[in-house]
Amino acid sequence: MITYKTPVDEYNFLFHDFLKISQQNIKSFSELNKDFTTEIFEMAGKLASDVLLPLNRIGDIEGCRLENDTVITPKGFTNAFKKLREDGWTSVDCEKEFGGQGLPTSISILLGEIFSSCNISLTIYQALTHGAYGAILKYGTETQKNLYLPKLVSCEWTGTMNLTEPHCGTDLSLIRTKAEKITNDIFSISGQKIFISAGEHDLTENIIHLVLAKIPGGPKGVKGLSLFIVPKFIPNSDGSLKERNNVKVGSLEKKMGIHANATCVMNYDSATGYLLGEEHKGLQAMFTMMNEARLGVGIQSIALSEIAYQNSVIYAKERIQGKSFSNEGQLSVESKPIINHPDVRRNLLDQKSFIEGGRALSIWVASLLDKSNHLMDDRAYGLASLLTPVIKGYLSDIGFEMTVVSQQIFGGHGYIEEWGMSQFVRDSRIAMIYEGTNGIQAIDLVGRKLNSDGGKNIIYLNELVQNFLTEHSELEELNNDFLVPLKESKKNVEEVLNFFMSNGLKNPNSALAGASDFLHLLGNFCIGFMWAKMAAILFKENEIINENTFQEGKILTGQYYMKNILPKTNYLAKKILSGDKIIMSLNSEQF
Amino acid sequence: MITYKTPVDEYNFLFHDFLKISQQNIKSFSELNKDFTTEIFEMAGKLASDVLLPLNRIGDIEGCRLENDTVITPKGFTNAFKKLREDGWTSVDCEKEFGGQGLPTSISILLGEIFSSCNISLTIYQALTHGAYGAILKYGTETQKNLYLPKLVSCEWTGTMNLTEPHCGTDLSLIRTKAEKITNDIFSISGQKIFISAGEHDLTENIIHLVLAKIPGGPKGVKGLSLFIVPKFIPNSDGSLKERNNVKVGSLEKKMGIHANATCVMNYDSATGYLLGEEHKGLQAMFTMMNEARLGVGIQSIALSEIAYQNSVIYAKERIQGKSFSNEGQLSVESKPIINHPDVRRNLLDQKSFIEGGRALSIWVASLLDKSNHLMDDRAYGLASLLTPVIKGYLSDIGFEMTVVSQQIFGGHGYIEEWGMSQFVRDSRIAMIYEGTNGIQAIDLVGRKLNSDGGKNIIYLNELVQNFLTEHSELEELNNDFLVPLKESKKNVEEVLNFFMSNGLKNPNSALAGASDFLHLLGNFCIGFMWAKMAAILFKENEIINENTFQEGKILTGQYYMKNILPKTNYLAKKILSGDKIIMSLNSEQF
C-alpha cells in the first residue's frame, strides 16, 4: 500500500534556513515563522494523504469517461476537488484583491508538490486554473479581472490552455484555429485543439478556455496569434451563467498515465471568444501561462520522485533478501533487509540527492519570482526565466528516471500495477512531454534564453556561483567535498559557453546539436550549486539545525551528489564539444 | 500505425562480414551462405509483420484472462503460435536428433529479435520453452530427453521456470516449496510460486514446469535446492497425456506491460514431479536455463528498441514542425520534417548506435556459445559467461531508455496508447527486472564472474581488445575515430579493475557499491569494441559492402558512438572509484 509523509523538516529547512524567507525584505513575508509554515505543511499533507492519495489508484484504474458531451471524472474526484478548494488550498499565492491569500510562490510551489505527490491527476485541474489566473491577471481588462479572477482563485471555475492542434504542437506558426471579429473584443472562434488537459470535466460548473487563434488578415506565423477567453458557459457580469458556448469535447485520449486527468480533443464551432490582451500578441500572453506551468512541471516531477522514493525506502527496509557485508567485510549469517546492500543504497541516494537538490533549485527559482513580483527585481526575473526550461526539462527527465529507479527496488513487484509503483512511472512520463517537450526546452535555453539581453542572465548566474565560492573559500569542511567539485563543474559550463559563442553564430546547428546535453549540464551544475549552498548553511549555522541526524544525513547526501552525480558535467561537455558534424552528415536514408 | 521491416542488410553484415560464420570451422555452418540467410530472415520477417505484429496491440488491450483454472490468451494468439511452430520457427537451433534444425545460436538469436520486435508477449511463450529444452537436454536422462525434447522443440508443449516465491526472488536460499520423495525419482511437490511467465495458457495441450524445491533433510540454503519436471498433464512414455497434475494457476497479475503474456501465481499441491539432474544440484541446472534466458532478454531489449526506433524514424521524416538550419547556417523559410533538427538526429543516433552495437555484441556472444558447443572452446564459454550479465543488464537498461527516447520523438502522440509507442516502453520495462533484476546482474558480474578462475575471462577479453588494437594500428582511417577512444575507455576498465583488486577483498562493499556502474562501464566498453571491429571491417573490406550508403551510414554511426557515448566510461570509472564510504555511512533513518 502506497503511503505518503510530508517532508516537513526538509521544507522548513529550505524555507527558513536556505531561503531565509522572513528576512527577504518582502513586507508580507516577514511574519512567516516556522510555526506557521509547519502548520500549513502539515495541514496540506493531511488533506493530501487522507483525501487525495486514496483516490490516486482509483483514478488510474477508472480513468475519465465521456458521456453525452460531458467528461465524468473517477469516483470521489468531485468531492476531493471541492474539499481542496473549500479549504482554501487553491488560492494560496493569489492576490488578496481577488480572494487569494498573498503567500509566497515558494510556499505554493511546495504545496503543489504535496498535492501532486498524492494525486497528480487531480492536482493538474487546479494547476492549469492557476495558469489561467496568471494570464488574465497580467493581460486582462479590469472587467475581465473582476469577472474571472475570483472564480479562478477559488477554483469554482477551472482553466485550460489551448495551443496544440493535430498538425502542430511545438510549431505554433502552423495554427489554423480562426477568430473572426464580431465586435471590438468579441470574436467567433472555430477550429480543433488537441491534448487539452482538463478540457472538459464534472468538477466545476464552468471551464475557462484560453485559446490561441489567428485573426484573418493578421501577420503570418506566430506574430499573427491572438489569445481568447472562451468560457464553456457564457457568464453574466455578476458571474452567474448564461447559455452554453459552442465549444465541445470531441473525444478523450487513452494515455500511458494521468488517467484521471481528462485529455481532450476540443472542437470550437463559432464559439464566442473574448480577446485577452492585444490582437496578435497572444503568444506573449500565453507564455506567461506556459512559464508558470513549466516551473510547475518541474515540481510535479519532484513530487512523483518523492512519493516513489518514500515507498521504495519503506520497501527496502522491509524486504529481506540476500546476505550482506558489514563495513568490516563480514558476511551476515542470515539474509538482511535490502537497504543493507550497497547497490540499493546507491539507488536510494541517487533519488534522495536529486529530489532534495532539485527541490532546492525549484524553491530558489520560485523565490526569484517572488523577488521579481514584490521587489521588481529584474535580475531575479531574468535568472528565473533562464532557469525555467532547465527546471522543466532537467527535473522531468531525471524525475522520470528516478521513478524508474524506485520501481526497480521493488523487483518483480514493481512491475505489478497493484503495488502502485508503475503508476508513478507512467504518470511522471508526461512531464517530459507536456508544456513543451524537453527537446523544445533545450532549444529555448540554448537558442533564446542564453543569449537574451547579451547573455546577462547566465553571466549573473556565474557571478552568484563565483561570489559563493569566494565567500566560502575559508570554510575548510566545505572545500574538498563541495567547492572543488563545483569549481570543476563550473569549468565545464564555461567551456561549453565558449564553444557556443565561437561556433553558434556562424553555425547554429553546432549549438543546437548540444542543446539537450547543455540543459542537463546546466541542471546538474545548478543542483550542485544548491547542494554547496545547503552544505554551507549546515556547516556554518549548525546551531539552527535541531536534529543532528537530519543535518548529518543531509551533508552525506550532498557529498554523494558532488562526488557521484555532478562530475557527469564533464562527460556532457565532451559530448557537446563534439559538435554537429557527424550528426548532420547522415542523409535521411541512413537512419 | 506501427510497422516493422526486418533489417536484413544489417543481419547479413553481422552474420557474414562481422562473424564470418561460414569460415568458423564449424562443419554444419559452412553451407550458410548469404542467399540462405537472406531467405530465412525475410521469411521470418514476413511472418512476424503479417501475423504477429497485428496482434501486438490487441494483446496489449485484451490481455490474458483467467476462467475456470485456465488462462485465455488474447484473440488470435493460439493461431499465431500454431503458425509459428508449424512453420518450424521454434526449432531452429535445436538438435536434429530431437526434431531441430541444428542452425547456429547466432541465427536463432536474430530470429528471436524479429519475433520479439513484433510481439514480445507471444515470443516469450516460445523462449521459455527453449530454456526448458536446454535444461532437459543437458541434465535429463535418456528417457526424459526422448519424452520431452521433441515436444518442446516443436512447441507442442511449452515450458516454464519456477523460482520465485512471495518472500523470495533473488535470494533462493529462502525457497520453501517442498519435494517429498515418493520413489527414487518421483517426488510430491507442494508450495506456491509467483511471477511465473506462461505458467498457464491455452496455446498448447501441455505445459512443462521446471520447479526449484527443497527435499526435506537436504543441505541448507541454495545447496539444498533440486530441480523437478512437473508437467501440467502427466505424459505416457509415447507422449500421449494422462491425468491432470495437481498444479494450478492461482491468479493472474495485472502488469505494466507484456499484457498478453500470462504472469501466474502457481499452486503446487502434492503435484507429481520428476527429478531433473541430481538431488540438491538444482540451482546449477536452473542456471543453464537462466543464462540462456538472460542472453534472450538482452535481445528482447534490442528488439523493442529496434521497432521503436524504426517507427520514430518514420515519424521524424513525416512530422513537419519548426524551421531548421542548413549546414551553412541558413534558416529555412518553411517548417521542415523534424528529422532536420539536430536534437532529433541526436536522439535517433543514440538509438541507432546502441541498437547496432548492442546487437553486434549479442551475436558475438552467441557465436562464442556456438564455438563452445561445437568446438568445446572453453575460453569462448568463459567469456560468454562473463558477458551474459552485461548483455542482460546493460542492454535492458539502455534498451528501455531508448524506447523512451523513441516515444519522446512522437511528442504528445507518444503518450497516447493508440500510437503504440507507450506499449514499447511498458513492455521493455520488464527486461530490467525479470531473469534476475539488473542489480543482481551487476552483483553476479562483480562478485562472481570477474573473479572466477582467477579472473581469466576478463583477462581474455582485454587480450582480445589489445590484439585488435595492435593488429589495426596501421589503419589510419580507424585510428583517431575508433582506436584512440577505445584505448581511452580501456584505461577506465583497467583503472576500475585495479581498484576492485586492491579494495574488494578486504572490503567487498567497496566493489559492490560500484557494481551497477561497472556493468554499464563494461557494457559501454564492449559495444565500443564492437563498433571498432565493425569499422575495421568496413574500412578494410569495403569490396564486400555492396551499398555505399549502408557502409557510410554505419561508419558515421560508429563514429558517433565512439565520440558521444563511449566517453561515458570515464565518468562511470570516477563514480566507482568514489567507493562505498559515503554510501554506507547513512544510517537507516537518514534515508
Image (spheres, coloured by chain):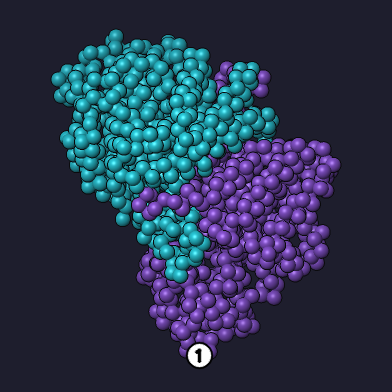
Chain colours: A cyan, B purple
In the rendered image, the vertical position of residue B584 relative to residue B342, given as above or below = below
Residue occupying the point 61% across, 77% down: B139
**Residue B92, horizontal then vertical, whole percent:** 67, 65
Identify the residue shown where x is 50% and y is 50%.
B581
Q: Is residue B327 above or below residue B550?
A: above
**Foreground residue among B371 and A234:** B371
**Label 1 neighbour load within 10 Å: few <14, some 14-19, many 20+:** few
Relative to B253, does residue B151 appear above or below in the rendering? below
Is A194 in front, or is A124?
A: A124
User: Residue extending furthest top?
Assistant: A184
Residue B212: x %, y % from top left: 50, 74
Does residue A455 lie above or below A38 as drawn?
above
Quick check: A509 left or right of A356? right
Left or right, residue A551 beside residue A455: left
Q: Residue at x 82, y 38 (%)?
A: B476
To which quarter of the image does residue B31 belong? bottom right
Helix, strand or loop under label 1: loop
Q: Give the residue type that dot 1 points to.
A: Thr
Indicate the position of residue A157 as horizontal and vertical percent values.
22, 29
Q: How many marks?
A: 1
Name the residue that disc number 1 marks: B183
Q: Can residue B473 be seen in this view?
A: yes
Residue at 62%, 44% (x, y): give it.
B569
Quadrant assignment, res B335: top right
Residue B337 in sight from this viewpoint: no
Residue A133 position within the rendered picture, expressed as x and y whole percent measured from the top left: 28, 24
Classify residue A304 as left or right of residue A517. Answer: left
